[in-house]
Image: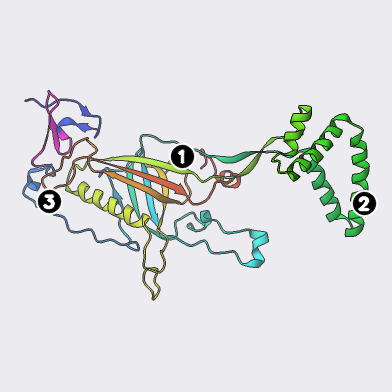
Amino acid sequence: MALKEGINPRTGLPYSESPGKSTTEEGSTRVDQTPYSPTTADQNKSLEESEVEYNQNSKFSILRYPKFDIYEDTDYLKIDVVRYVPLGFTIQKDVIKKGLKRSKGQYKDETGKLKDSLGSILLPIPQSISDTNSTGWGQDSINVGAAYAMGVANDVITSDNFFKGILSAIKQAGVDIGTLAQDGSTRDAINAGFGAAAANLFGGNTSFEGVLARSSGQILNPNTELLFNGVKLRSFNFTFALAPRNKDEATDIKKIIKILKTNMAPTTNSGGVVKGLFLKSPNVFQLTYMKGPSEHPHLNKFIIAALTNMQVNYTASGTYATYDNGMPVYMTMTLSFQELSPIYAEDQAALKGGVGF
């Protein structure tokens, strides 16, 4: 049967060069019997590979998939594996002026170079690229009674004489209550408060707001506002298609998977005399979108991140298919990263040009 012509959308290669498979006009597939042999000279070479020996402290040379040449306009994702550095604590005298340490400043020197990189992995630019920056906002309420109490407490605390401040606050509260009592709605609220207290003394389970609503059809204005309440850490998910076309790519794919798995896992040996008593933190990762030899000028930047989840699908084509030595023909690798520190306005402002973090 004649081979189908055109480009395989899964691998980006002509069907005649697709790794490990040939596709007929009818769409059937078969595993190539000489998958790793792009040249006649390689056909008789053994496909056996030496075992990949690697631990969490090992440095490694640059690994990349696929084995492409990098030109000025080549876009790709660089993943630097970096030895984890504990945050520690700021010494007491510097806490007020300098604040606590941040992970963002732990891993690079003054020039922006990584201090303790174990090696780099280069992967194709993801087909889906986005960044999400989020901040925490929440609904908050305070009625006039609570606000008044806060004002009284503030007056007492800031007064020159604490006891005189209390007496003055009580006196002023009496005047204010007398003024409020002249208002019909306020009298209803005061009566509701006493009514709720009395009902609860006899086993009731009601509130001031409930009694006020039942008796007068109104509630205290909660003065609800949406207020900032915190920051959120960013997460990124990437999926890569892995289809080795030769022995070198197959070897590098195995190394990449092994290195990522090893560095995202904690170690039970923390260097002490007692083994297994503690778990040592996994290593971390610096992600960088690249264009040729430089950072990509039009895509977002990252701060140091942890690899929180990794999934490798060894039958991504929908069926189990391997080369003669058992290497899967087509796999996918999904990586989930979460940055160690939140992004602040100062971080965005410090970047010159580009789209920021």
Assign a secondary structure to mark 1: loop
Q: Is residue 352 left or right of residue 181?
A: left
> Which is nearer the eye, 74 or 176?
176
Q: Is residue 8 magenta?
A: no
Question: Which label sits in the foreground, 3 or 1?
Answer: 3
Disc sitting over residue 47 in the figure? 3
Q: Which residue is mark 1?
A: 297
- The residue positioned farthest toward the top in the image shown: 26
Assign a secondary structure to mark 2: helix
Disc sitting over residue 277 in the figure? none
Q: Which image quarter: residue 1? A: top left
Disc 1 to disc 2, C-alpha distance:
64 Å
Residue 219 seen in this snapshot: no
Q: Is residue 13 left or right of residue 302?
A: left
Disc 3 to disc 1, C-alpha distance:
41 Å
- The residue positioned farthest toward the bottom in the image shown: 273
Q: Earlier in the sequence, mark 1 or mark 2?
A: 2
Q: Earlier in the sequence, mark 3 or mark 1?
A: 3
Residues in magenta, as a range: 17-34
In the rendered view, would you say 215 is above or below 344? Answer: above
Residue 342 seen in this snapshot: yes
Disc sitting over residue 168 in the figure? 2
Q: Earlier in the sequence, mark 2 or mark 3?
A: 3
